[in-house]
Image (cartoon, grey):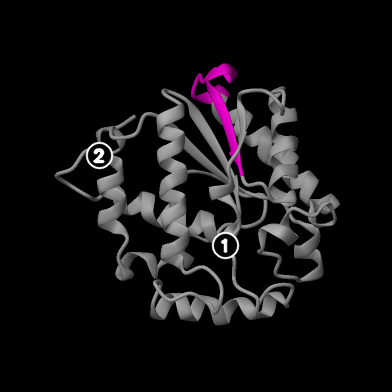
Amino acid sequence: MDKTTSFLQNRYWILRHGKSIPNEKGLIVSSLENGTRPEYQLAPDGVNQAQLAGELFLKELNQNNIAIENVRICYSPFSRTTHTAKVVASVLNLPFDGPQCKVMEDLRERYFGPTFELMSHEKYPEIWALDEKDPFIPPEGGESVNDVASRLAVAMATMESEFQGCSILVVSHGDPLQILQTILNATKQVNGCEEFSSRIQAVRVPTILSQHRKFALETGELRRVI
């Protein structure tokens, strides 16, 4: 781990869930209530994407001489992310109900509010235009970029406190993972404070948070982040 990330105790990879049934239907499914319904899990193509992502992750672990016992999978409780995490755990031969896999509600999808829930994917540009203008203003009844950054900071703090010297795969959703990458990338540029929570607080500003779309991921895309 290089000196720019010495304030962290673990290494992190992120994985956006595989192509889901909502993706196929072109639906925004962002509430916890809807997102955890079994009918909104992975589509067959998404299962294949999760399998390939698991194989790629395993390859990276082997290339970096990382033992499977040092791997943790932390995932959103939504059906599509749980399904993805299960497939990856199977590839790694990890028991999904064991201590190396942890569901974390703070990794859930960004809630876009009742105006957008179960509406067409074609509505996303409206939300992202609002984000670019002011990432502290939420869609009506939903979460702003800053709201999501706040709970992702809590998720990171939880993982840092519970795990030491681990390689952690974070299985989540498009917007949360874009926002997570935005804040983690910015923390590496912060000088003068070693405490992770202080670094996070320093980068939660409009000029940084409004840029989260630069870190977009495809469904099933694995990425090493820090």
Query: Is disc 1 surrounded by few (<14), some (14 to 19) or many (20+) residues within 10 Å?
Result: many
Left or right: residue 20 compared with residue 3: right
The amino acid marked with disc number 2 is Glu
The location of residue 69, given as percent across then percent down, is 57, 17
In the figure, 194 relative to 91: above or below? below
Give the side of residue 192 with respect to residue 46, left or right. left
* Range drawn in magenta: 62-75
The answer to which quarter of the image holds residue 92 is top right
**Residue marked by disc 2:** 195
* Residue bearing the label numbered 1: 110
73 inside magenta stretch? yes
- Residue ID at (73%, 36%): 86
Q: As rendered, which of 153 and 181 lies closer to the eye?
A: 153
The disc labelled 1 sits on which kind of residue?
A: Arg
Task: Tell me: residue 118, above or below residue 85.
Answer: below
Report the residue at 17% width, 47% height from top: 191
